[in-house]
Amino acid sequence: MDWNLLLTQFLNGLQLGLLLFLLASGLTLIFGIMDFINLAHGSFYMVGAYFCATLTLLTGSFVLALLMSVAGVFVVGLVIEASIVRRLYQHDHLDQVLVTFGLILCFDTLVHLIWGPEGMAIPLPRLLDGQITVGSLVFPTYRVIIIVSGLLVAIGLYVLVMKTRLGMLIRAGASNRVMVSALGVNINRLFMIVFALGAALAGLSGLLIAPITEASIGMGNEIIILAFVVVIVGGIGSIKGAFFSAVLIGLIDTMGRSYLDDFLKLFMSIQNAETAAPALSAMLIYILMAVILAVRPQGLFPPAGAR
Amino acid sequence: MRLVLEVHDVTTFYGDSQILFGLSLQVQEGQVVTLLGRNGMGKTTTVNSIMGIVPPREGEIRYGSRLISGLPPYRISNLGIGLVPEGRQIFPNLTVRENLLATAGNMSAKKDPWDLERVLAFLPSLKARLRNLGNHLSGGEQQMLAIGRALMTNPTLLILDEATEGLAPLVRAEIWSRLKLLKTEGQSILLIDKNLLALMRLADRHYIIEKGNIVWSGSSRELEAEPALKARYLGV
């Protein structure tokens, strides 16, 4: 067995998992706390990538562009919440799905109008563009950066939700929003902040992947489905659940794609294994979700004390 | 004496069904006022109307001189009304400490405000439970926590909806003694409960509600003098 390849694939899986976590953490807060299904969450992922692409060209600094883009997507989140999403909290999930699906189309068209149909690459500074060599293992520096920043954001988010006053209110709002507002907290403003925070995290996720894949129209639409799987597997409303299920799903998806055919060859013909493996690996995480829904419908780590 | 709360001719609906029919009541500064009546007569709806949770359709509610009917609940709370709701409604996924701190504040800039230390000294049974989640508490502890949580907002008027419902006699006695202590400190309280004897000892004024309207009001002595009232409206 090629241990270097295994380790590389493990790091790739971890990287996918952490990007998924950034996307899913906002989604799970918005779904779990505000009971709002936001299909357009992936649009913030895309907008983050385009903002960063343009700002990197304008400022010449990827890091500066990154910070400005995250702030920019936060503002876009505030505007979308105040103008559209706020009117939908009282509506049922079907209305929310329809409107936010419409929002996806609007965002995709808007991006098409502003940036054109072509994707946009984000050039990395030389410092981040190299490779890290450990023994015989060679791994791109930038992927390590993604993993490290994903972990840092995860820790920061955990501290925010578990240790700060804002986090207490977010969790309190998840269990009983009427009581939170009867005790003097402007729940509309709280929801607005949570929504924009989720948008900013999605934007960060999209702009982190863009130097590898480039920013493109509809880039958020595929990954948002994975993000919903992460939310459901982890337990709706649970940051901790989103973290572990995102990493799990990132690893299963990556490992499945690279090792499933070898595994199947152990007990079927080579030809059959090579036909079945790609189809099966694409299904793996959905099989995982089905199994978890069957045995633990509340998800792996449902929020403590949730009703 | 200064008027803390004035509910004037309020009608409130849940959807199409009318619950309150021109209800009026007043709470003076430093008074303990009760709202008595059988289940389903509109006591909790009165509380929800005051808090803005179910805004009244007609009539006016004033806090001091300020019109509060029509304001959202958080603004009414911030003006200085603290709620201990029916069913306690502790945040189950927050620890006791977090329940107390999450919504704490001193919007009306009280001198000598309630803080964590003072609330724990006042409700010592919470001290050992600070790290427990809200849903791991007994009913009595939850009610103490709900009272502490409301005090942490430093209210000028404290509203308790079903202050001792479903609690053991010892716990009830504890809550009555705590409320009595609050009263001696000058806290204005609007109180809903079924324990008439305790209420008559504690309160300055009683309102009896029947089918969404006040049908009688008076002092404890006046209520004592009219046993027919109790039979007719309170089922005692």
Image: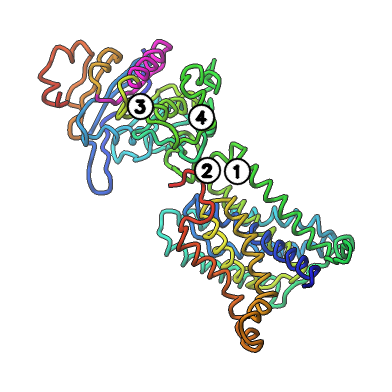
Q: Does the magenta-highlighted stretch encompass residue B32?
A: no
Q: Are marks 2 and 4 on the same chain?
A: no
Q: Amino acid at mark 1?
A: Val
- The reply to whether the C-beta atoms of the residues labelled 2 and 1 are less than 8 Å apart is yes
Q: Where does the magenta region start and end?
A: B171-194
Q: Which residue is mark 2?
A: A171
Position of residue B26 relative to residue A188, above or below, is: above
Chain ID for label 2?
Answer: A
- The reply to whether the C-beta atoms of the residues labelled 3 and 1 are less than 8 Å apart is no
Q: Are marks 4 and 1 on the same chain?
A: no
Position of residue A281 relative to residue A185, above or below, is: below
Chain ID for label 1?
Answer: A
Give residue B92's position: percent from left, percent from top.
Answer: 46, 39
Q: Residue at x 30, y 28 (%)?
A: B165
Q: Is residue B57 visible?
A: yes
Q: Which residue is mark 1?
A: A161
Position of residue A257 relative to residue A49, above or below, is: below
Residue A9 position by quadrant: bottom right
Marks 3 and 2 sit apart, C-alpha to C-alpha, by 24 Å
Q: Which residue is mark 4?
A: B100
Residue B230 position by quadrant: top left
- Is B228 positioned to the left or the right of A27 in the image? left
Question: Crowding at label 3, few (<14), some or many (≥20) Cα neighbours within 10 Å?
Answer: many
